[in-house]
Image (tube, rainbow, N blue to C red):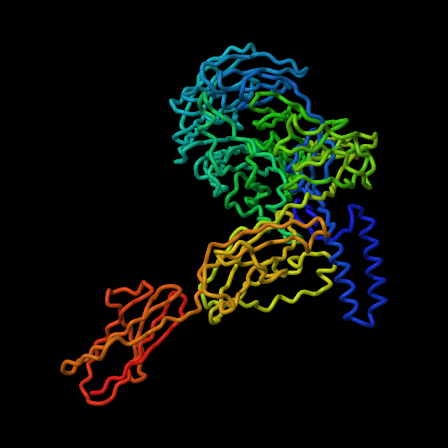
Amino acid sequence: MIIGNERHRGTQAVSFCAELWLNFHVLSSIIFVKYMKNPLLLIFVLSLFSISLKAADPSIWTVDSRSDVIKGDARGVSIDQNGTITLAPKLTEVFRTEQPYIWSSTADAAGNTYLGTGGDGKIFKVDTSGKGSLFTDLNELNVSALAIGRAGELFAATSPDGKVYKIDTSGKADVYFEPKEKYIWSLAVMADGALAVGTGDSGKIYRIKAAGAARDPSLFFDSGETHIISLVADTQGNLYAGTDSNGLVIRFSSDGKPFALLDSPLREIHDLAVGPDGSVYALALGDSVAPAASGAAATTTAPAAEGKTVIADKPGPGAPEPPQKSRYDLSGAKSAVYRVMPDGGTEIIWSSATVSGFSLFASQTGNGVMIGTSDKGRIYNVTNEGRETLTLQTDANQISTIINAGQTLFATSSNQGTLFQFGPEANAEGTYESAILDAKTTATWGRIWWRSGGTVQIQTRSGNTEKPDATWSDWSAAYTDQKGAQISSPKAKYLQWRALLRSGGRQVSSNSGSNGSSVSVSSASVSEVSVSFLARNIAPEVLSIQILPTNVGLASNPAIQIDPNIELSGLDPATFGIPNAAVPPRKMFQRSAVSIQWTAEDRNGDKMVYDVYYRELSETVFKLLREKVADNFFTVDGQSLADGRYVFKIVAKDSPSNPAGSTLSGERTSEPIDVDNTPPVVVGIGQPQTMGDRTRIVFEATDASSYLTRAEYSVNGGEWQTVYADDGISDSPKERYPIDLLLSSPGEYSVTLRAYDVNSNSGNARVVIKR
């Protein structure tokens, strides 16, 4: 079978070599022509050929879609919307703050970058040469927002119980505004030079209009929300605010009039950005990160766990992938990006149920945004049409902010707090490490082949621990022939491959920098990698055995008719809408039947047949009842077994999918059951006793092999009526049943008593009464 796109695609293959598969098609065509005049013979010959193929099926793991590739680790490479791996824009570490978090950043007109950190409340300045230094150290824990004023001054907001500081070019900080609010989350310089301040827990916006040294702070807007998380101003005099906990985007026109542009089902608008065409982009989060970012023990959003392939948890061969959700379906979404267009129209250009966005930067080309995430410190580029590219991946836990200083793009990270520059040139080389293939058992590795362009090499490594560690093999020597090479990594349960991409001199132009500049990207690329392997055969397991009540028989329902060409081709019937699950049997009444049902599994996915054995409890050797049963049930004619206590054994064998000498089996024995075919013996006791209109008769019932469960009587062939044992309950091998009758008319009466044992065997007797 093929596990493609980290899903199964069924195939039949004689060996690891794809060329032999072509030979099969040629041979099958010859067989078809030779025997087409005799259809029955044709089907027989082809079925034999098909069965012979199943004995040597390899599995093929193919990674060829974006959903597959994104699960791996990208080091210096990008992954486009089709899953193609190319060299990424060059990522350069500019400055380390030695602080755990960078919460805010901004750049001035001269190209200097300022970094607001936590949890020591420090601000760092990094000049255009990349030299960084401590600019100022504030009293609060976190510098949650930074903004450059019209005169080039730096404003800094701190939390918790924070203040807004005005900092001059020497780093001297003075308290500019103290709103007496618990949190200050955001700052923005408005068109008239006033400073807008977003706060929490009361969700207020303050406006501080400065005239020289005098300051005139005022309450600009009370939103009724918990937090004003984000603020941004455009060149038209509008101010935009993003809130928590109702996920609102509010626009304030130049006259201060508020208007809600967006009401998201996600709770927090974490970041806002304005595009060159006037579009407003909003990053919405399903869970608020505001409280976590306010205290000394603040933590970043946890990085996503590394993906890995687990074959047994994937759909069966050829089964369709689960339907992909629309990006407009935000049920269960962790984050989403909205675009509010200049005409007021709103669309969702990106959403994810697994990735938490943390920062936003509007492309200066006008087509989309860059999103910094806590998903392995990755930066994604998303166009207005929703096309998503993994631009690059860092070693940090999250990308906190993305800003530009002129034509240069910068990103900041947390854990640890670092400033990066990326682009405009592409990396000279990069690597991609795939997700981990879990073969479920020790596997023999076959060939590896791939589709690529430019200078690409592939390596593999293997091991027996779930995550690669020192016990894994070293990376193999590079495989250079993309048409295929024998994998040299040792046999193991897990396998991983990596691609090494190098620029080959030929470059193509790209705008993946998203700031309007052209990024030079190497033509080296990888679009598909396939690995063949043969897992060691694992014995089948019989998981459970169920014995149905006596007299319940099982019979096969009509099987679903399958075109024999489907099975011959090796495709899974599920591909054609035919379910893989076996049709359950129908139940019917069958005198003395003993029916057995069982569940079994084969970890290799092999087809199984079953042998059914039995023995009486006092015997030592099991006797074969039926062999090579294809169904997972069997009905025994109980009358063919003498009364006694029996156990049954089910042996599962994987012989249909393995050659002779390589088959394995597993077995399970049932709990003991009683076989009882002897009916109870019923006799009348003594003479009927009559007193007036009332007559009493007594029956006695005895069962030799089990115990009695109920009794009933009939008078002159009339309806059966329940009668109880003289001790009130039928539960022993011998019971007495007194019957009191009201017989007012003279005549002859025939009274019949019928008694049942636990296996529904019945016996009866008759007593005649004359009055």
Can residue 407 be seen in the rendering of this structure?
no
Question: Is 174 situated left or right of 503 in this image?
Answer: left
Seen in the picture, residue 340 relative to 595 is either above or below; the reply is: above
Residue 734: x, y in percent?
31, 66
> Where is residue 474, by image quadrant?
top right
Question: Which quadrant of the rendered structure holds the C terminus?
Answer: bottom left
Which of 691 and 457 lies nearest the eye of the viewer? 691
Residue drawn at (84%, 54%) of the image: 23
Which of 551 and 439 lies nearest the eye of the viewer? 551
Extreme residue in the bottom direction: 747
* Total number of numbered discs in the rendering: 0
Residue 582: x, y in percent?
59, 60
Question: Is 731 situated left or right of 313 in this image?
Answer: left
Which of 473 and 319 lies nearest the eye of the viewer? 473
Residue 403: x, y in percent?
61, 26
Residue drawn at (52%, 12%) of the image: 136
Seen in the picture, residue 307 relative to 569 is either above or below; the reply is: above
Residue 230: x, y in percent?
50, 31
Can residue 295 be seen in the rendering of this structure?
yes
Question: Is 424 situated left or right of 602 in this image?
Answer: right
